[in-house]
Amino acid sequence: MIKRTKAEIVTLNEICKGDLPAMVDTVRAEWPNSYSVSTFLPLTEANDAAITCKTGTAYGIAVITAVSADKYKGWSAYGKAFKAQDGDAERRGWVCAEAKGSYFACATQFAADKPRVALSQCLELIDNVIPSTQGHKSLPWVIGGVLNLQADGKTSLSDCTGDDYVHTGSDVQHVIASSSRTLEDTTTYEMHGTEFPALATWISGTWN
């Protein structure tokens, strides 16, 4: 799928850490004149016990980014569990990679069965996490994942994003971006062995 879409930013939900290096290598192959980096957040159960895949590696969420070599100035990683949780066995969280001087890219997955909790998690990310990050006003943001909220209506994604962000998606999968970006075509691709299809969005705008 990375090859098919030539993805420059990849957000991943429910991934085994052992599968991540091969995906980074694929991004690197598609963008040979760029630096490709990834960050991974292991998720835990409600009692803080680690969740592991059948392969024995950690289970969690991740983001992969590619930054052209002439713009690369290093990167930083951030991530943690949300304060608001729905009592499910799996604690939900967020993870972000900052391509210094270029953009922030985040992967997340909100609560599945309680829209109000999912909205609280979205508001925590938009209203607390992003404003607390140094440089958040000068760089564009992109957030992707299974957000478990509809785009509009009661208790929806629009209640979270406000005027500073735009969003697009399919069902409960969405991409959120700074309002200075334009979200172009959005397409889903069926994948084998996954609960959700891949969601690809083309984003235009000036990237530093």
Image (cartoon, rainbow, N blue to C red):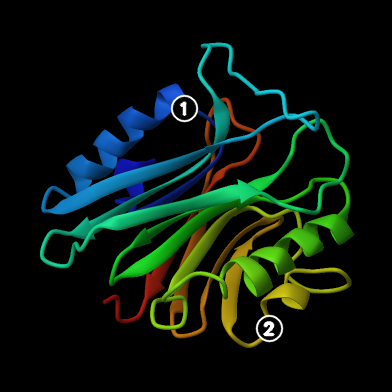
> In percent of the image, x 73 and y 76: which residue is there?
158
Could you classify mark 1 by the number of other residues whose Cα lies within 10 Å: few (under 14), some (14-19), or many (20 or more)?
many
Residue 59 in percent (x, y) is at 57, 27
Residue 139 in percent (x, y) is at 39, 77
Q: Nearer the viewer, residue 192 or 165?
A: 165
Residue 155 in percent (x, y) is at 86, 69
In the rendering, which numbered label is found on residue 104?
none
Quadrant in the picture for residue 14? top right
Quick check: 163 left or right of 98?
Answer: right
Disc 2 to disc 1, how far (Cα)? 34 Å
Q: Quadrant of the N terminus?
A: top left
Q: Nearer the viewer, residue 54 or 41?
A: 41
In this view, 75 is above or below 58? below
In the rendering, which numbered label is found on residue 162?
2
Amino acid type at image mark 2: Gly
Quick check: 87 left or right of 152?
Answer: right
> In percent of the image, x 63 and y 40: which residue is there?
196
> In percent of the image, x 81 and y 53: which residue is there?
84
Amino acid type at image mark 1: Lys
Quick check: 175 left or right of 153?
Answer: left
In the rendering, which numbered label is found on residue 17?
1
Residue 48 in percent (x, y) is at 73, 29
